[in-house]
Image (cartoon, rainbow, N blue to C red):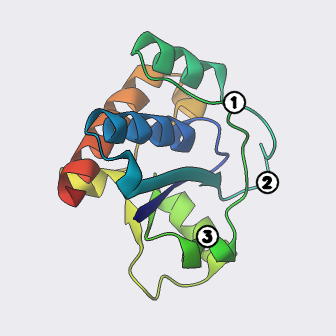
Amino acid sequence: MKKILFICHGNICRSPMAEMVMKHYVKEAGLEKNFYIDSAATDYDEIGNGMHRGTRQILSQNGIPYTDHRARLVTPDDYNEFDLLIIMDGENERHLRRRVGEDTEGKVHYLLEYAGLDRDVADPWYTGNFQETWDDVTLGCRSLLDSLS
């Protein structure tokens, strides 16, 4: 079983969006038993809070089911338990290193690298543009699943 952890700053916008999208893609492909997918935050800001309303709205608009997600903090145990830790931007990488240490096993990757892009996933917390984030997340998740299938 491949275990994937999506990570962003607060775990209320990008990483839970990626978690729900990836779970949907995996289910559509009939691969649910082959994957365990979760998400987490690098910082304490939103711990315990639900997904941002903009994230819930864009998931609903696109027919992606979602759970009553609550933001949680990434832990050193996550590094050991997950095969891939998928980050959204450079800040996530720096803060993740603070939480779990160096990526000695090559588990940490940027989501959009799977689509052949060298850029961050747009952060709707700052832009307010959940469509742009949706476009990045769906491209990254589709490419990630393709690379693992």
Q: Between residue 30 and residue 100, name the one nearer to us.
A: 30
Q: What is the secondary structure assignment of the residue under circle 2?
A: loop
Q: Residue furthest bottom?
A: 104
Where is residue 132? Give x, y as percent.
38, 26
Is the residue marked by circle 3 packed among few (<14), some (14-19), or many (20+) residues within 10 Å?
some
The Cα–Cα distance between marks 1 and 3, rounded to whole angstroms, is 21 Å
Q: Please give the residue where the numbered disc 3 appears in the rendered image.
A: 78
**Quadrant assignment, res 46:** top right
Viewed as shown, does residue 83 lie left or right of 136? right
Is the residue marked by circle 2 packed among few (<14), some (14-19), or many (20+) residues within 10 Å?
some
Where is residue 9? Give x, y as percent.
63, 50
Measuring 69% from the left and 69% from the top, which residue is drawn there? 75
Residue 68: which numbered mark, if any?
A: 1
Which quarter of the figure is the N terminus placed in?
bottom left
Measuring 53% from the left and 30% from the top, which residue is drawn there? 124
Viewed as shown, does residue 37 lie left or right of 41? left
> Can residue 118 be seen at all in this image of the molecule?
no
Q: What is the secondary structure assignment of the residue under circle 3?
A: helix
Looking at the image, is mark 2 or mark 1 earlier in the sequence?
A: 2
Q: Vertically, is 106 above or below 28?
A: below
The Cα–Cα distance between marks 2 and 3, rounded to whole angstroms, is 16 Å
Q: Please give the residue where the numbered disc 2 appears in the rendered image.
A: 44
